[in-house]
Amino acid sequence: MKGDQSATLHTPRLSLRPVRKADRGDLIALERDAEVMRFINGGRPTPEDGLDPKADFLMPRGGEPGIWTAVGVASQTFIGWFSLTPHSEAVAQLGYRLCRSAWGQGFASEGARALVRKGFVEMQLNRIVATTMAANHASRRVMEKAGLTYVRTVYFDWPDPLADSHLGDVEYEITRADWQRVT
């Protein structure tokens, strides 16, 4: 995978910079919001120490490659985080988690589109994928607005299932060729 995963990205309303350890307080506060975590771990707040052994792969703490802290350009406040993490040399997974105060304003779609562009233009990816619970309609809409299309639904037998997990997880994707056709 080519391209600089540590460069700051700018959109009209967001500044996306590599996540750093100084962001830890904002990251943990985000994870302590039950509504933010509803489709991640059933709304269970992250413990005070910031460690959730059941979901540590979803919990950036600063310094992880492929994760950007989102700050509002106008407000200069923490909005959330976005990620574009490699699956292989040519495939990466898109992710995001935003503060409730930023929901419904188009920030998630704006940041996701910026990372899709970075993935294909700078990182020379061939495909970008994203997943969420089938019941997470807001996240699915963000994926669609970023150009990703539904691929399939996968069903898992979780030892501690979340509400609506029986509906499965959905996978979306966009290929470089598809992205080039629409840009």
Image: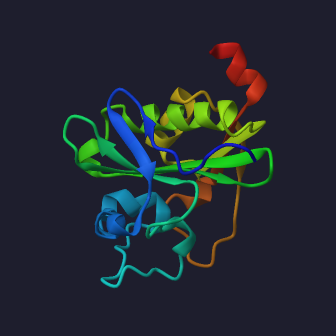
Q: Please name whichever residue, 79 or 137, is drawn nearer the observer in this view of the structure.
A: 79
* Residue 31 shows in the view: no
User: Quadrant location of residue 72?
Assistant: top left
Q: Residue at x 51, y 33 (%)?
A: 114
Residue found 47% across the figure and 58% down from its top? 39
Q: Where in the figure is residue 102, as x and y percent of width and height?
A: 28, 43
In depth, the one of 139 and 147 nearer the eye is 147
Q: How many marks?
A: 0
Residue 2, placed above or below residue 157: above
Give how far across and how far down residue 25 sits, in percent: 29, 69
Which residue is most to the left? 75
Using the image as rendered, state which of residue 116 and residue 18 is in the foreground. Answer: 18
Whole-percent x, y for residue 116 in the image: 60, 34
Residue at (51% x, 45% y) in the render: 7
Q: Is residue 117 visible?
A: yes
User: Vertical placement of 118 versus 63: above or below?
Assistant: above
Q: Nearer the viewer, residue 50 or 68?
A: 68
Q: Quadrant of the C terminus?
A: top right
Q: Position of residue 176 (x, y in %)?
A: 75, 28
Residue drawn at 67 percent across, 43 percent down: 3
- Quadrant location of residue 181? top right
**Drawn side of residue 156 relative to residue 102, left or right:** right
Q: Quadrant of residue 15?
A: top left
